[in-house]
Image: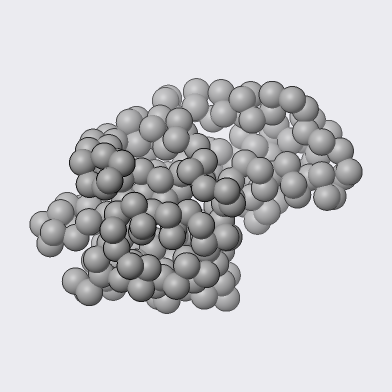
Amino acid sequence: MRYGLVIFDNDGVLVDSEPVSNRILADYLTELGHPTTYEDSLRDYMGGAMHRIHEVLLERSEKRLPAGFDESFHARVFEEFRRSLEPVAGVGEVLEKLDADGVPYCVGSSGSHERIRVALTKTGLWERFAGAGSAAGARIFSSQDVGRGKPAPDLFLYAAQEMGVAPERCAVVEDSPLGVRAAVAAGMDVYGFTAMTSAEKLAEAGATALFAQMAELPALLQ
């Protein structure tokens, strides 16, 4: 395999969380007087860190979300995660293939460390990422670790640095235009997963290649 590191987004790539979290977000914003559909949430917020929600709504409405919004939103999301969250179909086999080939991998997610932990624990993927594998003793990197979230390249560059791999030898697996743009800005190849986002939008954002099923990914990475 030509890559020295594969960086996986979490939501929508490792765990099938985007439908859950975006429905909850749309409902909650609507409750608060910001009418938002599920489709609106996917378009405007999917792949971004929490600060993006605050920034977009402040710009549009000139009103700030209430204090405690993040905590209340996460409480709703985590409750549903613990009840129903599943891994993305086929992702376990992809990770097994990377392990067999001796290719390091890690998580680079816009979500908080708590969100990543809850999601990976529920889906049985936590142990694959939480063990030794970086200078920090873990292979989990969050937008909390850097100053700017996606589409800025900071998170992916930080993950590569911590894992000791040059950006040009990294491949990123993403499912949102924001994430694709972040990987491109980091100088990394990026593989766009089209399960939740159209191939056209991911291609426009600069994806190196596109795939619709996880079973397709190992061959693309060769």
Residue drawn where x is 26% and y is 47% of the image:
134
Seen in the picture, residue 38 relative to 126 is either above or below; the reply is: below
Q: Viewer-proximal residue, 82 or 179?
A: 179
Q: Viewer-proximal residue, 148 or 23?
A: 148
Residue 148's x, y, as percent?
Answer: 59, 51
Residue 26's x, y, as percent?
Answer: 68, 39
Residue 11's x, y, as percent?
Answer: 46, 46
> Please, which residue is most extreme toward the right here?
62
**The C terminus sits in image quarter:** bottom left
Residue drawn where x is 83% and y is 50% of the image:
59
When asked about the image quadrant of residue 193, the answer is bottom left
**The N terminus sits in image quarter:** bottom left
148 with respect to 92 (left or right): right
Q: Tell me if I can see residue 9 in this picture.
A: no
Residue drawn where x is 62% and y is 41% of the image:
50
Seen in the picture, residue 216 relative to 162 is either above or below; the reply is: below
Q: Tell me if I can see residue 49 in this picture.
A: yes
Q: How many marks?
A: 0
Residue drawn where x is 40% and y is 45% of the image:
141
| Colouring scheme, one of rainbow, by chain, secondary structure, one colour | one colour
89 with respect to 74 (left or right): left
Q: Viewer-proximal residue, 129 or 160?
A: 160
Residue 216's x, y, as percent?
Answer: 28, 67
104 with respect to 147 (left or right): left
